Image (cartoon, rainbow, N blue to C red):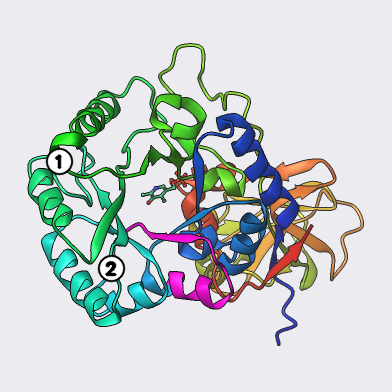
Amino acid sequence: MSFRPTWAEVSLGALRQNFRAIRKHIGEGPQICAVVKADAYGHGIVECARVLEAESAGWFGVTSTDEGILLREAGIRGRILLMTGFWHGDQEDVIRYHLTPAMWEPWQIELLEEAARQAGASKFPVHIKVDTGMTRLGVSTTDLPALCERLANSRELTVEGIFSHLASAEVLDAEDATQQIAEFERVLENLGNLKISPNLIHMANSAAIVARPGTWKNMVRPGLALYGYCTPIRGGRGREGGTAGLELKPVLSWKTRVLSLRDVCEGRAVGYNATYITHGPARLAVLPVGYADGLDRQLSSRGRVLIRGQYAPIVGIVSMDLTIVDVSGIAGVEVGDEVTILGKSEGANINAWEYARLCATIPYEVLCRISKRVPRRYVE
Ligand SMILES: *Cc1c(COP(=O)(O)O)cnc(C)c1O
């Protein structure tokens, strides 16, 4: 038990609201595969999956067998998609815990068939991952017929789904996205010749859910949108930055408290390497949060936090465990005051986009880099 007052507040109410907003946006047709990989983007995989399952998410998208097992052991009964397949040695657990792997290579079929035979399983469902142009994972459209042939003749396995992933879902006029979608459509038109008849066809991540209804098919895979963010849609003439009416609310707030306060005179060097010198007399607050908690060092003398509804700039270099902010302009700051690193405070707000831009990254990375040392507290 740690009393170090640095924590992340995860609003299960906001998560629920975002799920409902997505459901409303796509209508009752497509199923929702809630992407909870990477510990639900840092929000806590088990707690989030429980809430989403109660909201009737039928599927969960995870990265590894471990994450799938964690969900099963927590009592999640929905379907679990291993979006990056499984590792050599995981195949028995895939069967035992009834996880549904993405497949794209013959060796995966051999291993899983063998494990299914040993477990006495037949027609164990798998999803084929097709590389339509992102060049990451998936079977090429050239190798797809042979893979399908192999699976069509399998007694142990059956193709329940086929899917692909877009590289530029949020860029409406991106040539690569147009080509990927066309390539996937060609695959779908040709399913009859491939001798497989998958029930589930899926392609859309959050940005495609917002802006590309044609990719929804009969299942969508939202990740970031569930947690209350979306990549701004670009290249759509008149739809810049829009979310097509999808209203999302950030789920995570990151907080700490003032550990120490001091008044210093003009010309004081602050923090490692004396990179910041006070311009005048200043009141500085030391916060018990640093890069070991996931507070990016690029925020040194660039980021800001909220105290009593007002912005306090980070001064000097972010240390491993500590960060210094200038609270000169904020009246009445005391040791123990709550500090908002991400989130709202009395109407003022710092969101993961602001933070991400300062660090040349994206909200995904900001959220999932908040380290294990920061306890997650669940609130409505
Ligand atoms: C992470 C991931 C998603 C979710 O993407 P978001 O942009 O967070 O909605 C969907 N599909 C696959 C294959 C992924 O890896």
- Which residue is at a point 16% across and 52% down the rendered structure image? 152
Residue 379 horizontal side relative to residue 37, left or right: right
Residue 236, percent from left and from top: 43, 17
Residue 170, percent from left and from top: 42, 31
- Which residue is at a point 26% across and 57% down the rendered structure image? 158
Q: Which quadrant holds residue 171?
A: top left
Which residue is under mark 1? 194
Identify which amino acid the numbered label 2 is placed on.
Answer: Ser
Residue 279 visible within the image:
no
Q: Which quadrant holds residue 51?
A: bottom right
Residue 128 horizontal side relative to residue 66, left or right: left
Residue 304 horizontal side relative to residue 339, left or right: left
Give the crowd class for mark 1: few <14, some 14-19, many >=20 residues within 10 Å. Answer: some
Residue 240 visible within the image:
yes
Relative to the observer, which residue lies in front, 211 or 173? 211
Which residue is under mark 2? 122
Q: What element carries label 1?
A: helix
Give the crowd class for mark 2: few <14, some 14-19, many >=20 residues within 10 Å. Answer: some
Q: What stretch is highlighted in magenta?
A: 67-84
Relative to the observer, which residue lies in front, 323 or 1? 1
